[in-house]
Image: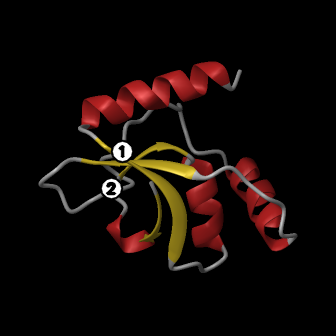
Amino acid sequence: MRKLIYMADIDLKQSPPVRAQLRADVVNEYAQYYKDKVTMPLQHLFIAKDDKWYLVADGLHRIHAQAQLGRKAVEAEIHDGTYEDALKFALLANALSR
């Protein structure tokens, strides 16, 4: 389900760490894409039934790019699931993007 999610409701620190580090050059490149109105893929966020925070499974660099531009919310594809579900999705997404 697509939904507009406030940045403050995304737990970046507890999201599955599938990349060695956040790359500033990629964040800056994506920020420029957003400024230029380039269509970017949606972020994929997971939330467990009783949680109030969303975990990033795919799109961490895109979220940081939008935050850099001062956006208070992002449109995302929302999935029901646990941390483990988000981790599996993240690993698969990164494997397919190579």
Secondary structure of the residue carrying tag 1 is loop
Determine which residue is flagged by label 2: 54
Could you tell me which secondary element the residue under label 2 belongs to?
loop
Q: Residue at x 30, y 47 (%)?
A: 14
Q: Is residue 41 left or right of residue 88?
A: right
Residue 26 versus residue 89 in the image, above or below: below
Task: State left or right for residue 82 relative to residue 31.
Answer: left
Which badge, 1 or 2, is on the more N-terminal residue? 1
Q: Position of residue 29 (x, y in %)?
A: 80, 55
**Left/right of residue 96 with respect to residue 16 in the rendered view:** right
Q: Residues within 10 Å of mark 2 (few under 14, many from 20)?
A: many
User: Could you tell me residue 52's position as x and y percent?
Assistant: 20, 62
Q: Which residue is mark 1?
A: 15
Residue positioned 61% across, 50% down in the render: 61
* Near-viewer residue (25 or 43): 43
- Identified by mark 1, the residue type is Ser
Name the foreground residue: 82 vs 30. Answer: 82
Where 89 falls versus 55 (above or below)? Answer: above
Q: Please give the name of the residue rendered at 42% of the width and 35% of the height, measured from the top-left corner.
A: 17
- Locate residue 96, reporting x and y percent: 64, 21
Occupied quadrant, residue 38: bottom right
Q: CA distance from mark 1 to mark 2?
A: 8 Å
Residue pictured at 34% horizontal, 51% vertical: 13
